[in-house]
C-alpha cells in the first residue's frame, strides 16, 4: 500500500508528543484499547474551572496564582482555561461572583419576607459556611481585601447586604423596623458594616473546630437588638450638634 500515507506523514507533530483529550494533556500511547473520556459540556467545564480557581486562589494567594496553576489544579491545558477567562483577574472576579451568590442563597438574602430568617439563623448559617467552606471564606473575607477592581467591589457589596440583612432581623425583633437594602443610607451602612465585621471576626476563629451554633448564640447575646436600636436612634437624633461657629470658637 505504497499510496497510503502513514501517520507521521499526515500529522508528524502528533507522534511522540502530547495531545489534548477532554481538556487534559495526556501522552499519546500506542494502545487504543483504553477507556475514552467524554467531553464536558461548556457549563460543566466552567464549573470545574471555577472550583479550580477557588482552590488555587485560596491555596496560593492572589499574587502567586497564575493561569498555569489554575490549569494544573483543574488538570487541563492552559489554552482551555483561556477559553473561559482572559486573565487571572477575570478568573478571580468570576469565582468571587459564584461564591458570593452561593452565600447569599444560603442566607436567603433577597428571599420573600415571609421566609426571612432570624438573626440567629443568619449567623449560624454564616458561621457554618465559614467552618465547612474555609476556602470560600478565606477568599471572600481575607484575600480579596487586598485586591482591587470587580472582585473587591463585589465583596464590598456582599458585606453590605449581609450586614443589612442581619441588622434588619435584629431590629425587627424590637418594633418591626427594617433597614432596606436600597436605597442605602448612612445609618444603615454604619450598622451593617459594624455587624458584618463582628460576625466575620467570629467566623474567622472557627478553624479550631468550635461549634458554629454556640458562637451564633454568643453573637446573639453580644448584639442585642435594643442596643442596635439605641445606636441607630443616636445617629438619627445626635445630641448637642456642634455648628461651624461653635467648632471655630472651640
Image (spheres, rainbow, N blue to C red):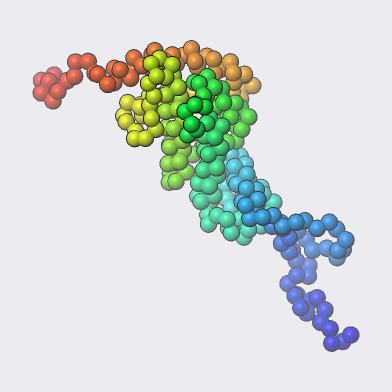
Q: Within the image, what quadrant is residue 24 found in?
A: bottom right
Q: Considering only vertical position in the picture, is 32 above or below 221?
A: below
Q: Within the image, what quadrant is residue 245 found in?
A: top left
Q: Nearer the viewer, residue 39 or 14?
A: 39
> Residue at left 39%, top 12%?
226
Q: Nearer the viewer, residue 181 or 242?
A: 181
Q: Nearer the viewer, residue 21 or 176?
A: 176
Q: Which quarter of the figure is the C terminus placed in?
A: top left
Does residue 68 appear in the picture of this structure? no
> Residue at left 62%, top 60%?
79
Q: Nearer the viewer, residue 125 or 28?
A: 125
Does residue 111 appear in the picture of this structure? yes
Q: Considering only vertical position in the picture, is 129 above or below 28?
A: above
Q: Considering only vertical position in the picture, is 243 above or below 106?
A: above
Residue 193, given in percent of the width and then of the height, sits at 40, 27
Q: Which quarter of the figure is the N terminus placed in?
A: bottom right
Q: Within the image, what quadrant is residue 20 found in?
A: bottom right
Residue 48, given in percent of the width and then of the height, sits at 65, 48
**Left or right of residue 20, residue 182 in this image:** left
Residue 69, given in percent of the width and then of the height, sits at 62, 49
> Residue at left 60%, top 35%?
135
Amino acid at each position: 500500500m505504497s499510496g497510503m500515507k502513514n501517520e507521521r506523514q499526515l500529522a508528524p507533530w502528533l507522534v511522540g508528543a502530547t495531545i489534548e483529550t477532554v481538556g487534559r494533556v495526556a501522552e499519546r500511547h500506542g494502545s487504543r484499547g483504553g477507556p475514552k473520556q467524554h467531553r464536558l459540556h461548556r457549563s460543566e467545564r466552567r464549573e470545574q474551572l471555577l472550583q479550580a480557581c477557588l482552590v488555587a486562589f485560596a491555596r496560593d494567594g492572589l499574587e502567586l496564582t497564575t493561569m498555569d496553576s489554575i490549569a494544573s489544579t483543574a488538570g487541563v491545558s492552559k489554552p482551555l482555561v483561556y477559553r473561559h477567562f482572559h486573565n487571572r483577574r477575570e478568573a478571580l472576579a468570576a469565582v468571587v461572583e459564584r461564591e458570593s451568590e452561593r452565600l447569599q442563597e444560603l442566607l436567603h438574602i433577597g428571599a420573600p419576607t415571609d421566609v426571612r430568617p432570624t438573626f440567629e439563623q443568619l449567623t449560624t448559617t454564616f458561621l457554618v459556611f465559614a467552618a465547612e467552606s474555609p476556602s470560600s471564606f478565606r477568599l471572600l473575607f481575607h484575600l480579596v481585601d487586598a485586591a482591587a477592581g470587580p472582585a473587591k467591589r463585589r465583596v464590598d457589596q456582599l458585606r453590605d447586604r449581609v450586614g443589612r440583612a442581619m441588622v434588619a432581623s435584629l431590629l425587627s425583633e424590637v418594633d418591626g423596623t427594617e433597614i432596606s437594602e436600597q436605597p442605602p443610607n448612612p445609618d444603615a451602612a454604619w450598622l451593617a458594616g459594624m455587624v458584618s465585621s463582628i460576625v466575620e471576626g467570629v467566623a474567622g476563629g472557627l478553624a479550631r473546630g468550635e461549634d458554629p451554633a454556640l458562637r451564633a448564640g454568643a453573637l446573639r447575646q453580644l448584639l442585642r437588638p435594643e442596643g442596635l436600636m439605641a445606636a441607630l436612634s443616636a445617629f438619627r437624633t445626635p445630641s448637642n450638634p456642634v455648628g461651624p461657629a461653635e467648632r471655630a470658637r472651640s
